[in-house]
Image (cartoon, grey):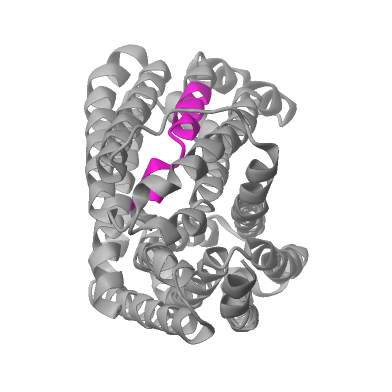
Amino acid sequence: MGAGIIKSAIPLFLSMVTGMLGTLVVTSVLGRHATVTLAAFAVMTAVLNPATAAVTGALRGLAPFVAPHRDEPARAVPVLRDARWLTLLVGTAGALAVLAVPPLARLAGVPPEVVAELGPLPWLLALYLLVYAAGGGATTVLVALGRSRQVLWSSLAGTSVMAGCALVLVPRLGLAGVGVAWLLSGVVGVVVANVCLRRAIGVRVGQARPRPARIAELGRVSLPLAATVLIKFGGLGVVTFAASTTSARDAAAHAVLSTLTGLIMLASLSVAQASVPEVARAQDPAGARRANRIAALVALGGTAVGALVLLVLRDPVLAAFTDDPAVRERAGELLPLMLLASAADGAQAVQGIGLTALKRSAASMLYFAAGYGLMVLAAVPVAATWGITGLWTSLAVTNLVLVVLQGTGFRRHSAQVGKVMVEA
C-alpha cells in the first residue's frame, strides 16, 4: 500500500511544483514590466488565491464518492454529473468574489493608480474560475480512480500555456495579458484533464438534470472542505498582518519563511491526496487506519528530506529570496521553528484529508475553526510581546494541537467504516 501511495503521490507532487513554477514566471515577468502592475497583481491575488483554493477544496471533496468505483469507473458518471452542478455553484461564488476586488480595493484605501491598473483582469480571472469549476474536478476524479499520472499532463499543458502567454502578452498588455494567459491556461488544463478522464471512464460524462438530494450529499463533504481552506487562508493572513506590525526586517523574514513553508508542504499535500482513494475504499477500520498511518509516515519522510535539504543549503536558498543580510540572518534563526511548524502542518493535513476520505470533512472544519480561531485571537498580542518568534511558535503549537485533534477525530470516525458499509 505504501508503494502505491508513493507512486500516486509523485505525479501530484510534480504537478504542484509545475503549477508553482508557472506562477513564479508570471510574477517575474510582471516585476520587470512595472512596479504598479506588480502591486495591482498582488491586490488581485489576495482574493484570487483563497477563491481558487476554496473551489479546489470543493472539487477535492468529490474523491470519496468516486474512489469506490475505481474498478468500474463508468459507474461514477452519475456522481460526476451531480458534481458539476455543485462545482459551478462554488465557482460562481468565487467568480463574484474576484469581480468585487476593485470596489473592495477602493474601500480599503488602495492607491487609485493601482486600482486603475487592474483593468479587465478581474473579469478574465472570474471567467477562469468558472472554467475551472465547469471542469467538474476532473483531476480529483483521476486521482480517485488511480490515474494520478495523467494529472501531471494537465498541469504541464496548463503551465506551459500560462508561462508562454505571459512572456508574450504581458510586455504588450500588462495585467490584461496575465488575465488572458490565466484563462487560456485554465481552458487547456481542463480540456486535457477531461480528455484523460473520458479515456479512463470509457464513456462520455455529459450533463443531466440536477438531483438536489444527491448534490446536497456531495455538498456535505465538499463545502466544509472549502470552508476549511478559507479558514486556513484567513488565519494565515491575520498572522501575516500581525508580523507586519513588528519591524520591516522581521516582516520580510516572515514572508520568506512563509514561502519556504509552501515548498515544504508540497510533499505532504501530494501524499495526503494520494491516500484518499485508499482510505475511501477501505473495508474496515483497520484498513482505513493502516492507509492513513502509511500516508502520515510517507508525508513525514518527504518533509524530513525537504527540511534536510533546506538546512544544508540554507545560505544559498535564503539568498535567492533576499539580498538583505539582516533579513537572511533573522530567517535563518527561525528556520528550525518554521520546519517544526511545517512538519506538524503536513501531519495534520494527512489526518484532515483522511477525514474527507471518510466523508467527515465537517469535523475537520470544526477542528480548524477551533485551533485557528484561538491563534487568530492571540496573533496581534503575541506579535507585540514576542515578535515573529512568538508568531511562529504559535503556528507550531496550533499545528501540533491540530495533529492531535485531527488524528483523534480520524480514529473515532474510522471506527464506523465497516458499520456504514453494512448499513448501506
Q: How far across and down, in percent of the image, does residue 99 sit?
A: 61, 23
Per the image, is 279 magenta?
no
Which quadrant of the structure image shows residue 132?
A: top left
Residue at 37 percent across and 45 percent down: it is 74
Residue at 66 percent across and 50 percent down: it is 217
Residue 168 appears left or right of 357: left
Which quadrant of the structure image shows residue 196?
A: top left
> Quick one: 160 or 243, which is closer to the camera?
160
Residue at 25 percent across and 32 percent down: it is 163
Q: Measured along the vertical axis of the image, is residue 80 above or below residue 365?
A: above
From which residue to which does the magenta span run?
A: 125-142
Residue 253 appears left or right of 139: right
Per the image, is 128 magenta?
yes
Viewer can see residue 85: yes
Q: How far across and down, in percent of the image, does residue 285 sit?
A: 53, 83
Q: How far across and down, in percent of the image, does residue 236 sit?
A: 60, 58
Which quadrant of the structure image shows residue 147?
A: bottom left
Q: Magenta span: helix, strand or loop, mainly?
A: helix
Residue at 71 percent across and 31 percent down: it is 108
Residue 7 appears left or right of 229: left
In which quadrant will I find the C terminus? bottom right
Q: How far across and down, in percent of the image, does residue 211 sit?
A: 64, 36
In which quadrant will I find the N terminus? bottom left
